[in-house]
Amino acid sequence: MYAVAMDMGTSGFRLQAIDLKEEKIISTAISTRHPIPGMNVIDHVNFAIDVGQDVCHDLIMNAINELLSLLKIELNKVERFAICGNTFQLSLFQNIEIRDLAYAGEHKLKALGVVSPKRDGGIFKAEDFGLAINPDAEVIIPPAVKHEVGADALAMLLKTDVLDRKEVSLVVDYGTNAEMGLIVEGEVYTGSAAAGPALEGQEIKCGMLASPGAVSDIEANNGNWRCYVLDSEFIARRGDLVNPLDGSIIEEGEMHGYAKGVTGTGVIATISCGIDSGIIHPPKIGTPSKRLHLQDRVYITEKDLEEAGKAIGAIRAGFFTLLHEAGLPLDAIKTSYMSGAAGTYVDARKAQRIGLVPTTASRIIQVGNTSLSLARDIVMNPDYIYELREFARGLRDKHIMFATSETFKSIYIIELAIWTNSMPFDMYNEMMKLYKLPPIPTEIENPKVEKLVERDIPVLGELGIEILDEIGVRISSVLDNCTLCKRCMKECPEDAITIKEEDGKRIAVIRSDRCGGTACRRCEEVCPTETLRLKDMKISV
């Protein structure tokens, strides 16, 4: 008898096979992307509304079934499947109403005839979803706190001891859709910042998710930089010592020749070291090539710096907004928890120096992937969802919608001025005064860092890990007025689109996991006949 636990993230999926009798993990399978076009949850929402929820549901199920096939178990012997993720992802998995998540305001929802479904979770059958496992297997879905606060937020609260803290504490799941919670005397202030994918290594020129071959950390050494690269077991190993100005190798490390790209934590470390050394003055890189060179021809560009800065700014604006809403000074946070892959592999002190962790935190605790951990708890004890329901109902929660918060908007404008418009850091508090907001603390603590796990998935299982690089399927549409100019192919930043001729028809074919979705639309914009439209795309047969 087997079980499968799944973390359904905004940037990718993680699955683990579990032997129910032995109560041990057998194998792990992960994807490096999400099958729905787009780079964050807002993109996914827009695509689902424009193209159709059924299409998105089918994309998700195809991807999950691909990953299931990589777990190296007899799928017809799977008795349970538990899944954890944010509210939108789980709603698409269940194929239930999502428009209540997309639109703010009761009047708008009423005009559309939208009725919010209950999101209490439950136990279902695998055949209800089209999972390629035993059709009678139990599929266990945990509850949401409310429609804005999903099971992944429950996970980061329950899989840490943050709720037991007497001091003001912050917990953040660092990722594309950065969920965060501020705990003040038992009350939880929650928010979710659409930070974008840069901190997970996407939308970065040489970027990749945390997987073997990723540069995950940098250490400065007398003007040169030591790279650290993830090995096949996701452990950061010593790489080359390089000159960041030109990439020349000063000393080879054990991971010489193994780097394929840089993950989000490597980007964070690069920015921190670059600012400390004076090479970076956002948004500029002061090298002849306007790049920072790592090992094996991996590099960071000024565009990468800008994308990462936007994500850093969104997260910092988020936790400052929570503090302001709680009526607390911006130096109130003393303990900060970091969860998720980025929160696990990043050097916590470097993250704090560039603003991803409150400067006043004297204790930083790195806890790993709490969402997958909660899914494992549920799959081992299905009745646990009833306890989760009670917990969710009793949680003293106040959710702050950052999209409509004037405080968030004001702080994020300042962050953008820093990261995209060359405003010096020392002008930050002058700008805060203009918006009648309290000043941010400028002194950085020397925090005590506790890393509870070496990698975000601590145990991979005796059969190890499989990585699915191409999780998406092809979506396509016939283009009646296409001139075969192929401007769309040249314009696509991810090389996601192909135009082909078949049986006298001109067809656009898009790889769904590479497409930037409705937030990009560059292919649509350059089409001279306006015949290419994402909303016309259907899954290719």
Image (cartoon, grey):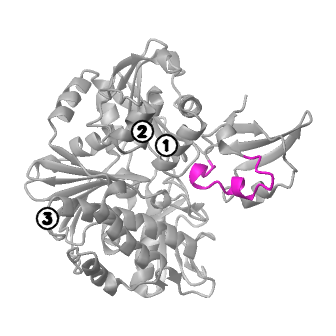
* Residue 496 locus on image (x, y percent): 69, 50
Q: What is the CA distance from the residue labelled 2 to the residue labelled 1?
A: 8 Å
Residue 467 showing in the rendered view: no
Q: Please name the residue that numbered disc 1 is placed on.
A: 45
Image position of 454 (left or right of 541): left
Residue type (three-letter) at the residue carrying disc 1: Val
Using the rendered view, name the quadrant where residue 446 is placed: bottom left
Using the rendered view, name the quadrant where residue 359 is placed: bottom left
Q: What is the CA distance from the residue labelled 3 to the residue labelled 1?
A: 33 Å
- For numbered disc 3, what is the local secondary structure? loop
Q: Which residues are magenta?
A: 514-532
Category of crowding for the residue at label 2, using alpha-carbon neighbours closer than 10 angstroms: few (below 14), some (14–19), many (at least 20): many
Q: Between residues 40 and 465, which one lies in front from this camera angle?
A: 40
Residue type (three-letter) at the residue carrying disc 3: Leu
- 321 relative to 383, above or below: below
Q: Residue at x 55, y 47 (%)?
A: 33
Q: Are marks 2 and 1 in contact (CB under 8 Å)?
A: yes
Q: Residue at x 33, y 85 (%)?
A: 427
Q: Between residues 424 and 433, which one lies in front from this camera angle?
A: 433
Using the rendered view, name the quadrant where residue 144 is placed: top left
Q: Residue at x 81, y 47 (%)?
A: 499
Mark sitting earlier along the chain (3/2) = 2
Q: Are marks 3 and 1 in contact (CB under 8 Å)?
A: no
Residue type (three-letter) at the residue carrying disc 2: Phe
Task: Return the mark for residue 88.
Answer: 2
Q: Please name the residue that numbered disc 3 is placed on.
A: 328
- Quadrant housing the N terminus: top left
Q: Between residues 450 and 89, which one lies in front from this camera angle?
A: 89
Q: What is the CA distance from the residue labelled 3 to the residue labelled 2?
A: 30 Å
* Residue 481 locus on image (x, y percent): 84, 45
Mark sitting earlier along the chain (2/1) = 1
